[in-house]
Amino acid sequence: MIKDRNELKWLRRSGDEWRWVQQYISRHADARMRGNTERFARRKVEGYDQVVVDIADFEQTTEGLKFVTRLKNALRQHRYRSASNGRKPCTFSLPNSTRASLSRRAKDNRVTETEVVTMLIDDAEWAARKHSEREKTLKTTLALERMRSELAIESLKAQFEETMKHLERSTERLVMWEQAMESEQPPFEGDKENVKREVEKRLKKVKTVNAIIALSYDVPSRN
């Protein structure tokens, strides 16, 4: 089974470059590399993702890393010489410092200046694509978080409404008792401090829910 790997920055998924890379591996990888049991077992598997897995296997060793470097250089030459790779002459002016940097990069990497420009553009496209993917993932995450927040607010609103109904019923019973007994305070011989603490405990819950709902709608809460 092909393992999930990241996309190769230097190999385009579109087109059939992966096929050329697989052929290069078959022709130029030494016997020890090609004799890897895991790779040998899946040798008939083709596709871009398979190439990604093969390259990841090569990069586990020093010799494999050197081989991948040679492969990249060969791929650049293949792109440059490919008849199917349409080319159009371009003329543009560059600052002297940029021109010198371009020449230096080409010399250091033993490639042409055209290949350097192509690689830089490919890298920029790859970075832009990855940025777009991350942005899409972030938007999805934010949408889910917003949905969860809205559900939480709805739940708090329901709790608040239920608490207010309970408070309304309690107030109604108190008024009925006052009118029936013609007294504002019922006879009570218990611990008034305990009563006070219980009242504060119940009101604290109401105030907390009220404050959260008020913040979600950016309105002042009633304490």
Image (spheres, rainbow, N blue to C red):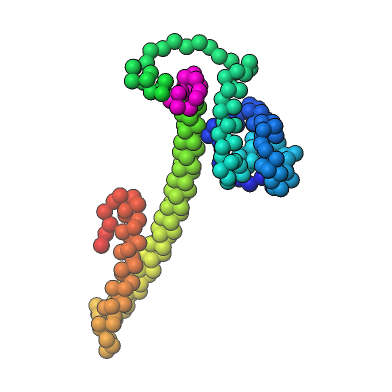
Q: Answer whether residue 108 is magenta in the image.
A: yes
Give the x, y percent position of residue 183. Answer: 25, 80
Name the foreground residue: 180 vs 198.
Answer: 198
Q: Which residue is pictured at 30% across the width and 75% down the height?
A: 199
- Tell me which corner region of the image, top left, top right, bottom left or bottom right, holds residue 67: top right
| Left/right of residue 42 with respect to residue 76 in the rendered view | right
Region of the chain picked out in magenta, as a range: 105-118
Residue drawn at (63%, 46%) of the image: 3
- Most prominent secondary structure in the magenta stretch? helix
* Residue in view at x 71 percent, y 48 percent: 37
Q: Is residue 187 left or right of residue 169?
A: left
Q: Residue at x 59, y 41 (%)?
A: 63
Quick check: 49 above or below 96? below
**Nearer the observer, 78 or 8:** 78
Q: Position of residue 193 (x, y in %)?
A: 25, 82
Q: Is residue 129 magenta?
A: no
Number of residue marks: 0
Q: Residue 75 vs residue 131: left or right?
A: right
Image-quadrant location for residue 105: top left
Decide if residue 168 is in sight here: no
Q: Kindly indicate the quadrant of the structure image that contains residue 181.
A: bottom left
Q: Position of residue 24 (x, y in %)?
A: 66, 31
Q: Give the image location of residue 123, x and y in percent.
A: 48, 30
Q: Is residue 172 left or right of residue 136?
A: left
**Can residue 177 be seen?**
yes
